[in-house]
């Protein structure tokens, strides 16, 4: 079977495709033929040793996948050969086959295709934990989403709308903002062409948003936080811009506002039951059509580096997936 291998820390072009032996599950494990693997911004960081999660070299990157069970190890009771499953793992998804612990899988809901199944766990899991659990966004409140056409951003828009909130999407191009509108954004702001503070003021009648969802950091964080509403909650989700911003703490006092950290991977590890409940709620929203994952690109296994480079270059909207059989 073929797999992407990271042999030394570096940029996506240093990844190689290798022929590896077929996988065999050990006790408590499940072997899966991978049909699709979701690509995420953290994958770009992990291969450069710039992320909080650091696998040992050499390793196969990729943390979320969908596929078909090809074999089960001793003692596995929640899966059988031929089952269609979703798995979230530390690494290993950018391959034609993978072995995962049996507790890392869940069935693909009826009617869901493999690409969608591979693309929902991390982005929707993160945004649900952020918006529902950490920010406690309520119907009728307003949420501003930065980097809104990206993976976690589009998920945050849809979750905000599913909760009955008003959602303002901010992104760097009108093309990206058109996609945000298609996914439910009520108002849009192009932060590459105008003054962000003025635009937020105009979009909220001067009151400021109740919640700000920030997966970008860098130059947008301070002007956004200065614009937040009374009792606002500012979600610190990520730093796609590369720069970790610093904020004067008096700004929290002036608005009675909170800075709220979000770390979905740790939440899922420490609070698995709460994470499962969130996933179940989102599967319900998917079935009702309230959330519609946007998959903007599909790449063959040999083109994994191109997929990662496209994400790093801000070329991607929503999610892209690797289809390892291609
Ligand atoms: N806290 C958590 O638990 C958690 C979980 C998952 C992901 N994250 C983090 O959340 C961030 C976004 O992840 P994602 O999967 O949504 O990524 P993504 O799909 O690549 O979206 C990130 C967005 O950030 C914006 N951006 C601004 N400057 C950028 C730059 N220099 N390079 C790349 N993008 C830039 C882009 O939008 P514009 O072009 O419109 O500005 C892009 O659409 C990442 O930092 C990731 O590590 C955190």
Image: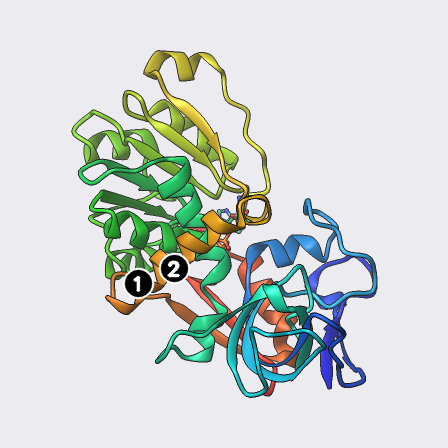
Residue 36 visible in the picture: no
- As measured in the structure, the alpha-carbon distance from the residue carrying label 1 to the one carrying label 2 is 6 Å
CB under 8 Å between callouts 1 and 2? yes
Which residue lies at the image location 47% right of the left edge and 73% below the top edge? Answer: 107
Dividing the image into 4 quarters, which one contains the N terminus? bottom right
Dividing the image into 4 quarters, which one contains the C terminus? bottom right
Give left or right: position of 244 versus 48.
left
On residue 280, the disc is 2
Q: Position of residue 249 (x, y in %)?
A: 48, 15
Which residue lies at the image location 50% right of the left edge and 37% below the top edge? Answer: 217
Name the foreground residue: 70 vs 297.
70
Name the foreground residue: 20 vs 46.
20
Q: Position of residue 37 (x, y in %)?
A: 56, 72
Name the foreground residue: 290 vs 221.
290
Disc 2 residue crowd, few under 14, some 14–19, many 20+, Cα 10 Å:
few
Which residue lies at the image location 16% right of the left edge and 29% below the top edge? Answer: 205
Res 294 quadrant in image: bottom left
Residue 66 visible in the picture: yes
Name the foreground residue: 203 vs 68.
68
For mark 1, what is the residue? 284
Q: Is residue 288 above or below residue 204?
A: below
Which residue lies at the image location 42% right of the left edge and 62% below the top edge? Answer: 317
């Amino acid at each position: 079977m073929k797999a992407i291998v990271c042999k030394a820390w570096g940029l996506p072009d240093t990844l190689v495709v290798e022929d590896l032996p077929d996988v065999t599950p050990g006790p408590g494990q499940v072997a899966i033929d991978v049909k699709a693997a979701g690509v995420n911004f953290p994958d770009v960081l992990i291969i450069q040793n710039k992320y909080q999660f650091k696998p040992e070299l050499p390793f196969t990157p990729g943390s979320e996948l969908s596929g078909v069970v090809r074999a089960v190890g001793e003692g596995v009771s929640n899966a059988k050969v031929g089952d269609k499953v979703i798995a979230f793992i530390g690494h290993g998804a950018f391959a034609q086959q993978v072995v995962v612990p049996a507790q890392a899988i869940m069935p693909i809901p009826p009617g869901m295709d493999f690409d969608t199944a591979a693309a929902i766990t991390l982005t929707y899991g993160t945004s649900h934990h952020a918006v529902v659990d950490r920010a406690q966004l309520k119907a009728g409140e307003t949420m501003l989403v930065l980097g809104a056409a990206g993976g976690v951003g589009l998920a945050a828009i849809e979750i905000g709308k599913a909760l009955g909130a008003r959602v303002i999407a901010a992104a760097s191009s009108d093309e990206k903002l058109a996609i945000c509108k298609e996914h439910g954004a009520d108002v849009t702001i192009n932060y590459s062409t105008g003054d962000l503070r003025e635009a937020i003021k105009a979009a909220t009648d001067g009151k400021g948003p109740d919640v700000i969802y920030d997966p970008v950091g860098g130059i947008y964080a301070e002007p956004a936080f200065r614009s937040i509403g009374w009792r606002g909650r500012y979600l610190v989700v990520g730093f796609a811009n590369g720069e970790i911003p610093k904020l004067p703490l008096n700004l929290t006092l002036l608005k009675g506002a909170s800075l709220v950290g979000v770390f979905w991977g740790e939440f899922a590890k420490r609070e698995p039951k709460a994470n499962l409940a969130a996933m179940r709620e989102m599967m319900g929203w998917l079935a009702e059509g309230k959330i519609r994952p946007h998959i903007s690109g599909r790449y063959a296994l040999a083109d994994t580096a191109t997929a990662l480079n496209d994400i790093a270059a801000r070329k991607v909207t929503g999610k892209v997936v690797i289809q390892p059989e291609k």
